[in-house]
Amino acid sequence: MKRLSVLSAQIMSLSITGNALAGERTVELAVDNMSCIAFAYEARQAIAAVPGVSRVKILAASRAAVVTFDDAQTTPDAIAAASAEAGYPARLAGSGG
């Protein structure tokens, strides 16, 4: 019985560690068509609706969005696609376009 408890504790420890290693990433996206506060809000809502996105900060002056997400649930391309679908084409900042 004691051996079973130790084994259970080890398994739980591994599952917690696995979740902690899930890749939370932050990227900056250049977002087109954000020419006013209302458009920035709409772009933010579209990006925030992507499963796995945990934080969106809009940088209106530079027409960019800083997005924190779980890379086990989504990708920068999927986030950019959601923004584009809402009318705000996006790409990784510095990637041209």
Image (spheres, rainbow, N blue to C red):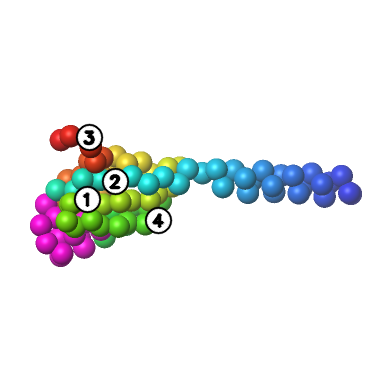
Tell me residue 61's x, y (percent).
17, 56
The residue labelled by disc 2 is 28
Q: In the visual, does 19 lie left or right of 6?
A: left
The residue range painted magenta reads 33-44
Front disc: 2 or 4: 2
Q: Residues within 10 Å of mark 3 (few under 14, many from 20)?
A: few
Front disc: 4 or 1: 1
Q: Residue at (40%, 49%) from the top-left corner?
A: 69
What is the quadrant of residue 44 in the picture?
bottom left
| Residue closer to the observer: 11 or 55 | 55
The residue labelled by disc 4 is 54
| Cα separation between marks 3 and 4 | 23 Å
Q: Element at badge 2?
A: strand
| First in sequence: mark 2 vs mark 3 | 2
Q: In the visual, does 48 lie left or right of 19?
A: left
- Marks 1 and 2: CB-CB under 8 Å? yes
Residue 38's place in the image compared with 21, above or below, is: below
Q: Is residue 51 visible?
A: no
**Amino acid residing under circle 2:** Glu
| Cα separation between marks 1 and 2 | 7 Å
Tell me residue 1's x, y (percent).
89, 49
Residue 60 falls inside the magenta stretch: no
Q: Element at badge 3?
A: loop
The residue labelled by disc 1 is 64
| First in sequence: mark 3 vs mark 1 | 1
| First in sequence: mark 2 vs mark 4 | 2
Q: Is most of the magenta stretch helix, strand or loop?
A: helix
Q: Is residue 76 visible?
A: yes
Front disc: 3 or 4: 3
